[in-house]
Image (cartoon, rainbow, N blue to C red):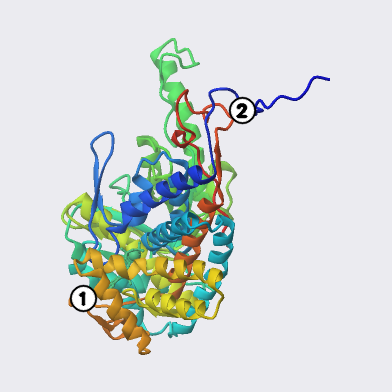
Amino acid sequence: MAGLTNAPILILKEGHKRETGKDAQRKNIMAAKAVAEAVKTTLGPKGMDKMLVDGTGDVVITNDGATILREMDIEHPVAKMIVEVSRAQEDEVGDGTTTAVVIAGGLLENAEELINIGVHPTVIVQGYKAVQKKAYEFLEEMAVTVSTEDRDILKKIAETAMTGKGIEVFKDKLAEICVDAASAIEEDGKVDVEERVNFVKIGSGSVKDTELEQGVVLDKERLNPDMPKKVEGARIVLLDSTLELKKLSTDAKVTISSPESLSSFREGEDEVLKEKVDAMAKVGANVVFCKQGIGAYASRYLANFGIIAARRVSDEDMKFLALATGGKIVTDPLEMSEEDLGSAELVREKKIGKEKKMIFVEGCHGAKAVTVVIHGSSEQLRDNIERALEDALWSVGTVLESKKIVPGGGAPEIEVAEKLRQYASTMSGRDQLAVKAFADAVEEIPLNLAENAGFDSIDVLVNLRSSHGAGKKSYGLDMNTGKPADMMAQGVVEPLRVKTQAIKSGTAAATLVLRVDDVIAAKVEGLRPKPGQSPHDYTRRPMMPPMM
Ligand code: ADP
Ligand code: MG
């Protein structure tokens, strides 16, 4: 047998790039940090805005971290992982996205330093995970339990979540709406904002006219002036099929030889529509919301029965109507029964502003669902209000569910960091490293709050640390003076869960990135980098990181 040579064994095709070890880690960390860099200037009430311009020139101006990350056209696989984590934060608690990403960036930056002095990434990952649990403990310790009856506190929660979103002037009114809406949809201790709150945005009127409706509001008018303007004791059909005559196009399958046969054909079709409307009237319907078209004939016939109808109702609205009214979406009226009908105390067409009319479905017994009708002159403004309301609604909902709040303004982060450092001092040399790195990462929050407001971040940190050292747990950054102040007294409060989840999401993202030590071009078509391209350049939808 011939002797073995020392030639390297190739396991990948020639030309394929692969990055391993420190190289891969460094690049991955860089990418993740770049995402954090992109959003950290938006953090807090004095955060800056980002202007996002898409290919068609449409512009979105926002400082909402979640929106920025969603809209950014990100290519790098690791950067995408960070974006996914921010989505997890948004899906879990609806707020604290920027915080989560900034913490992830901090954890990675500090990990990089540790890697550089020879600490193995696995050791860092284990350390971070262990510290994370301690961080929750310290957050729990500083949390305050509140009564869900306490409207003032709930309003403060809403206001803090809305701060810095460019809608300061309307904060009071919008916070009221949030508290009313979240309380209205609470059921068995759960507040499902995603499912049970709908937003309708209207270009007329001013933000002051924004209001909450207990039910569903459709940006639709009744189809026919002969239909009633309102019905009480509404029995509602949610229809997903057409009530229009078939269009006679050139490739229609019928051949019509004389004008008489055309009209008899039409009559035949009219007959079908008539049957459908009859069937709906027979089960007692007095409202029909149709996802597809309703033709003039059917519309008149519906009006004869005193039925209010609207057509081309969007898919989303249909689903929301089904939830709110307890109705089923039916496709064939001939086969529907009374049980398929939704119900509401009142369905009426209402005038909004000078010329707009909308259909209101009120007093729904199917489920607790509300609609916020947002008024505002520009689309930008309306979108910003919707985003702010969403964050605030989620936060109020979270407090209604879990009843625990913490002061904001960086107070919890300083407290956690201080406690972690004390905890680290009880450990042996090397074990301390990850704990300290974690503490520093969490402190990125007050640091960036200060920086974004134009304060000296080092001064701010030193002052806050000394307040907390003196036992003033609820002291955070006063945005007007740059000095430590009691955030509880100032009404800057947040749900505990937003803070714990931000640490959870941030740590999940960082450890996920740290565990990767090899970036190899995958075999799947479309994922393979082009010749000469680094594996860092190809796109791949990342897997959701496991939540710890
Ligand atoms: P995120 O996406 O993480 O929610 P935000 O831009 O909404 O980011 O900023 C949230 C941070 O701003 C929190 O740390 C919160 O405590 C702080 N904050 C909000 N309002 C105030 C305020 N009036 N004074 C000080 N800090 C505030
Ligand atoms: Mg926020």
Looking at the image, which is closer to me, 320 or 77?
77
**Three-letter code, disc 1:** Gly
Q: CA distance from mark 2 to mark 1?
A: 56 Å
Residue ID for mark 2: 12
Looking at the image, which is closer to me, 522 or 158?
522
Judged from the image, the secondary structure of the residue bearing numbered disc 1 is loop
Based on the displayed image, in which of its 4 quarters is residue 58 positioned?
A: top left
Judged from the image, the secondary structure of the residue bearing numbered disc 2 is loop
**319 relative position to 353: left or right:** right
**Three-letter code, disc 2:** Leu
Q: Residue at x 84, y 20 (%)?
A: 1
**229 relative position to 336: left or right:** left
Q: Position of residue 100 (x, y in %)?
A: 42, 61
436 vs 18: above or below: below
Instruction: Answer with mark 2 or mark 1, whichever residue precedes in sequence.
Output: 2
Looking at the image, which is closer to me, 371 or 8?
8
If the image is split into quadrants, where does the C terminus sit? bottom right
Q: Position of residue 19 (x, y in %)?
A: 52, 37
Residue ID for mark 1: 482
Q: Which mark is residue 4?
A: none
